[in-house]
Image (cartoon, rainbow, N blue to C red):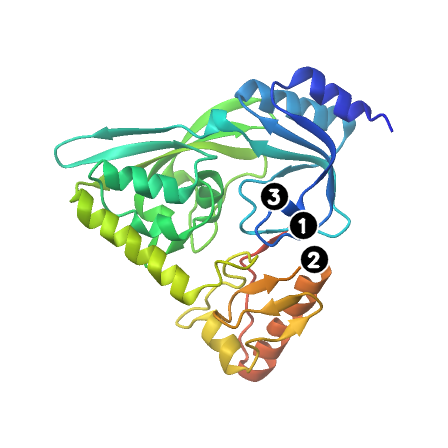
Amino acid sequence: MADALVDQLAATCSGRVDGGAPLAPLTTLRVGGDARVLVEVESDEDLAAVATAADEHAVPLLIVGRGSNMLVPDDGWPGIAVLLGRGFTAIEVDVTDDGGTLRAGAAAPLPKVAATAAAAGLGGFAWGAGVPGSVGGAVRMNAGAHGGDVADVLVEAELFRLRSRTRELWPAAQLGLGYRRSALPTDALVVAATIALPRADADAERDAIRDVQAWRRSHQPINEPNCGSVFRNPPGDAAGRLIDAAGLRGLERGGAQVSERHANFIVTRPGATAQDVLALMKTVHDTVLAEYGVDLRSELVVVGR
């Protein structure tokens, strides 16, 4: 069936445009329905065209990123899903005697940023090798691991404002970064970020990255579809410890299961649905609340909520 929205985007965007595109393969949970249209953008001009089409057709926008912290509903997304293409993956490094800066496009994977920093003799970002997300999502959510986070190193973020169709440069202090959150406006899409890092021994940093990767292999279900940590750690405690203590490790709802390897991870099997994941999350939340009085907050972004 013809779709005027798809036709408009195909005519105005340089990247690929797919109507009725499945979103599950673009998320690390591998569940969820289709988008009305999926657009891979390569430039600010493409982003402006997407914003214009969304306004003219009165449909919502969804920025997919690497899909590592996202749950798409089973009935899909009724508007435009946006992927940042190769035009947003460049990494530039500027090294001085005592440190350096690294500017990365929003679609650059954090493990690649960590490897690039290490190769340049810059330290303090090995933790990024353990986060399977992109720079853009990491800034918006203030991603972190192994005692480090984006707020520790961020200098500034470049934003594309979907309402005004303009690019803005925001210093880190303006972003309102907190534990797994930021105060970015809803129409602000991170398109690049600059971080500052100290000088370090390149071999030592590569070793640190290998240690992070080895820890992930030992402690997280990296070979099963998952979304990373499902719940935020409450102050002074760990969500995984509470879930495990409540006897929920291995609990199943349909095709979703609390990971046997790490209790704050949910893994999915073929045939799983987004509703299975939501039902399991609710059971875990309610059980921990009843047992320990702790109101676990979701780190997973449920699309449309």
Relative vertical location of residue 251 with respect to residue 2 in this rendering, above or below: below
Disc 1 designates what residue? 72
Q: Is residue 149 left or right of residue 12?
A: left
Q: Answer whether labels 1 and 2 touch (C-beta < 8 Å).
A: yes
- Separation of residues labelled 3 and 1 (CA atoms): 10 Å
Nearest the camera: 61 or 42? 42
Spatial separation of the CA atoms under disc 3 and disc 2: 14 Å
Q: Residue furthest top?
A: 11
Q: Which three-letter amino acid code belongs to the residue tagged 1?
A: Val
| Proximity of marks 3 and 2: CB atoms separated by less than 8 Å | no
Foreground residue among 70 and 169: 70
Task: Estimate the x, y position of residue 141 in percent, counting from the top left.
Answer: 48, 48
**Left or right: where does residue 129 sit relative to residue 141?**
left
| Residue beneath disc 2 | 274
Q: Position of residue 2 (x, y in %)?
A: 85, 25
Give the answer, above or below, for where 255 lies relative to 83: below
The residue carrying mark 3 is: 26
